[in-house]
Every structure is written in C-alpha cells, then in structure tokens.
Amino acid sequence: MPIEDDDEKRVAKILGAGEDEDLPNVSEETLKVYYGYLSKNLSFPFDAEYSRETGPLEDTYYDIEVTDILSYDDVPDLESYGLFCTGKQGRRKIEIPLAEIEVKEKGKNEQVIEDYSFWFCNYR
C-alpha cells in the first residue's frame, strides 16, 4: 500500500522505505536505525511531559527535562517499550520510554518525537 500521509513519508525516509513500500514494523533492526536518526536530530535538553494513570479515568501529568537518549544497547525489552530517554523530574533522574513523552515547545524536537511515537505505536 503506497505511503500517503506526511507522518508516514517522514518515517519512511528515516527507515529507508520507498513510497511504494509499506512502513517497516518495529524490530530491533528498525529501532537501531531510528536510534541513529534521533541521536543526530534531537537537541537536548528540552522540556516535555508524560502522564500516568492515578485513578479510574484519571491521569496525572508530570513535567520533565529530557537530557538525552538512553543508549540503544542499554534498553531492556527493546521491542516492547522502544527507545528510552533520560531526564530529570525535579531533582530525581528518570528513564522513560520515548513514545510516552510529549514535547512542550513547538519546533523540530516536537515533530521528531511525534513521528517516532506514531511509528512505534502503530507498527508493532
């Protein structure tokens, strides 16, 4: 099925897929390619947030400062959780799956993270 929307076109370019091909599924190999892209194209630090379910139909949002991407080789269960970022929540250091964060400021980082999250969530 040809790649038609802009999200898919950007991800296809990152993963080396042609417009007449399907987007590759999430795998150790494709995550390694995406890691290389993210390492070169994200600017650190940046502000983001993530949410956690804290009750029935209730989420709490947490502000974080993302400081880096966790090394590809250090990610446990890569295909289940995807790539991780490292950061600070107040004074506490955290590691969180990259697909679970939202960048707070408009710009390149926001688009790069949105594209990764779109692909990771839809092609597993």
Image (cartoon, grey):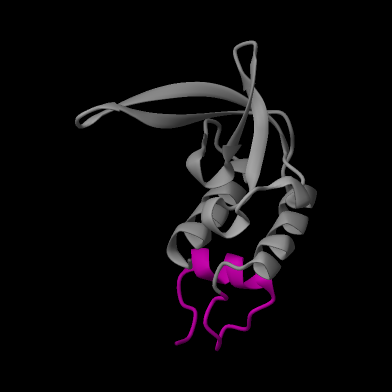
Above/below status of 69 relative to 53: below
Q: Position of residue 84 (x, y in %)?
A: 63, 43
Q: Residue furthest left?
A: 56
Front in this rendered view, residue 83 or 6: 83
Q: Position of residue 115 (x, y in %)?
A: 54, 56
Quarter holding the N terminus is: bottom left
Q: Is residue 77 left or right of residue 8?
A: right
Tell me what residue is drawn at x 65 percent, y 38 percent.
Answer: 85
- Choose top left, top right, bottom left or bottom right for residue 69: top right
Q: Position of residue 70 (x, y in %)?
A: 72, 41
Above/below status of 62 relative to 71: above
Front in this rendered view, residue 9 or 45: 45
Residue 109 belongs to the span the image colors magenta: no
Tell me what residue is drawn at x 57 percent, y 55 percent.
Answer: 116
- Count of marks placed on residues: 0
Above/below status of 113 relative to 104: below
Q: Residue furthest front?
A: 76
The region drawn magenta spans: 1-24
Front in this rendered view, residue 111 or 39: 39
Q: Position of residue 11 (x, y in %)?
A: 59, 66
Question: Can residue 15 be seen by looking at this rendering?
Answer: yes
Q: Is residue 1 left or right of residue 34?
A: left
Q: Residue furthest top?
A: 91
Tell me what residue is drawn at x 70 percent, y 69 percent.
Answer: 29
Tell me what residue is drawn at x 57 percent, y 60 percent.
Answer: 79
Question: Can residue 14 be seen by looking at this rendering?
Answer: no
Above/below status of 60 relative to 80: above
Residue 19 belongs to the span the image colors magenta: yes
Q: Is residue 51 left or right of residue 35?
A: left
